[in-house]
Image (spheres, coloured by chain):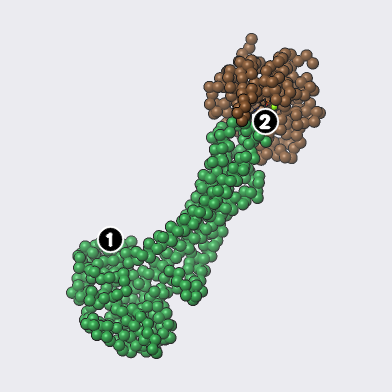
Amino acid sequence: MEAPIAELKNVSKNYQAENVTVAALQNIDFRLNPGDMVAFVGPSGSGKTTMLNLLGCLDKATSGEVSVCQVNVAGADHNQLAELRNREIGFIFQSYNLIPVLTAFENVEFPLILQGVKDPRERRERVEAALAEVGIRELQDRRPSYMSGGQQQRVAIARALVKKPVFVLADEPTANLDSKTGEEILKIMRKMNEEKGVVFVFSTHDRMVMKYARRLVGLRDGEIVSDGGNGV
Amino acid sequence: MSTLKLAFRNILRNRRRSLLTALSASVAVLVLVVATGFIGGVETDSVKSYLTTRTAHIKVYAAGYPYNDESLPLDQALSPAQQSRLVDAGRDVGRAVGRPIGRTVSGLKMAPRLLFSASLIKDGEELMALGAGVDPQADPAVLEAPGRLARRLTDPRGILVGSDLARLLHLKAGDTVTASFRTRPGAIYADDFTILGLVDSGNPEVDSNYFFISLGAAQDYLEMPGGATEWDIRLERPDDLSRVETALQKKLGPEFQVVSWRKQLADVLSFFDLRRKVFVIINAALFLMAVIIVANTMLMTVYERFKEIGTLMALGMKRRQILELFAAEGSLLGLLGGLAGVLIGAALIRYFSTHGVDTSGIRNRGMDINVPIKGKLYAELATYFYFVAVAVSGAVAGLAAMWPARKAAGLEPSEALRRN
Ligand SMILES: Nc1ncnc2c1ncn2[C@@H]1O[C@H](COP(=O)(O)OP(=O)(O)O)[C@@H](O)[C@H]1O
Ligand SMILES: [Mg+2]
């Protein structure tokens, strides 16, 4: 068996909110494998975002062991985690989260600058290729406020993919889009997965979205209740 | 996309808020520049006025002579023997410090004065005045009041009167006036004198108190042959001040007191100092307001941009870089605001350094503005100060942004992303 891209062993995550401890995740064991196209599915509050935050090194587990790209997250400091996110992990958000003062081009270029890619020609080539891949090269000089939700999410996908990450996390990537646009976004992700082997992890509670995953992990009240191939 | 460029675009997001915030820095910097310009200009012109009309660079008195009060005692004058020692010492020191300047080798010029209390009486009106016996030849080389007019003092019954003093007594050149004073032995002497000219030195202290008479005549009337209460010294190079002061005092010994203009004007200089301190406090309050406004704006910005901060962290921005971004935004507000303040300030200084501000209106209403300058007040500011002012503004605003910036940088990425 290949080494996992990320692995959670007996992981729990609690939140402390006004003297009440909320168990967002309990005793989770999970492996993210090369080639995966996995969806966390479950109702609101079931722990999907928490799961993705742990995989994305945006948060640390309360107990258990999280390793991402062979890095033990608990033992890493915030600079190391920032670097890990920058180099290995792509992020796609429900509300796109583009930087409003940057054009589409600059948004996609941003992670490369953070990576220290110095040569502007190299950056330009990579950004233009990423934008072309999601089909919006002609919008590269627009700022987010001059783009539709679907267009913004495509920019976000380009921004996640331009750095050739080991895996991409997408938290309810279609929740703010109409179903047709949402499906186009999913098709792009699926295509990237099939053609380039990009590993995607997304979360959703939408049945339509689930069919684009190859592996479905069911979450309920912070526990994994099912994990298997997508039979749909 | 450099941090600075990103910061610049971010401050353009909410233009009105940024403008108002930057404006607070503009006001602080504008006040800093204009007030410093006027304070500097007034100090320079004041010192120049004192130097040329009253204090010279150095004065030498007999030990114990109370040069700081208005008693002007004649029994503590310099004797002729002391004066010749003084002249010799001056020549030696002058030679020691002198550099060839044209054909003059000596570094200093000296002139004796005999100061005495008197009153001027005209048509039953009597005003206290300060009589100064001056050497018509030597004095103009040292002081500008009476300056060249001193050459008119050939007649022992002729005097020059300060223009304001003359005005108060309704006197003009050619009029006669009665002068009354006590001689050295203690007799009261009163006689009529002809006004040979009016002295308009620009220093109100001189123009409203002094009248001038030839030294020889003064010595005769006061019955002090060869006497002088002080010798005034003008240096070719003002930088030699402390060297000459110490050298002279050392040569002359304890029978004399050598007093530089700095010592003579100690009260004035400490007033300058106090004025600057008061201004610093007022200006610091303005900068503090700017700090509060910048901090408030940046704090609002941070709260509005929680999710964006989370995104930047997800993309791999480090805490230090987030801190730099927000500090840069605050700094830019201060720099741009400061720049605007400096530009307006520089325009004002430029205008007032040539046109000046007329203070005669204030004076005519009888207000004392504590400045030995009768005409206009001119501003003066070294160019480097503008750069300092902008830099201070940027640094202060950057510091003001530190607290909000630290708040931004200290967020947990997952927390920041959850907010809206
Ligand atoms: N920062 C937090 N503080 C307190 N409770 C939280 C926090 N984040 C998540 N939770 C709680 O943890 C549980 C799981 O949340 P989440 O992972 O966001 O679920 P989902 O994404 O599936 O809707 C929920 O009950 C939620 O209220
Ligand atoms: Mg969620």
Residue at mark 2: chain: A
**Nearer-the-camera pick, B166 or B69:** B69
Quadrant location, the C terminus of chain B: top right
**Nearer-the-camera pick, B199 or A222:** A222
Q: Write down the colour of chain B.
A: green
**Nearer-the-camera pick, B138 or A128:** B138
Height in image: B229 above or below B123? above
Instruction: Identify the chain drawn in brown.
Output: A
**Label 1: which secondary element:** helix
Q: Position of residue B83 (x, y in %)?
A: 21, 73
**Nearer-the-camera pick, B345 or B95:** B345
Residue at the (23%, 64%) spot, across then down: B249
Q: Amino acid at mark 1?
A: Arg
Give the residue pinned by disc 2. A159
Q: Is residue B210 visible?
A: yes
Q: Is mark 2 within 8 Å of ligand 2?
A: no
Height in image: B347 above or below B200? above
Q: Is mark 1 within 8 Å of ligand 1?
A: no
* Residue B243, label in figure: 1
**Label 2: which secondary element:** helix
Q: Residue A163 falls in which quadrant of the image?
A: top right
Q: Residue A89 falls in which quadrant of the image?
A: top right
Q: Amino acid at mark 2?
A: Arg
Horizontal relation, residue A216 to residue B135: left or right: right
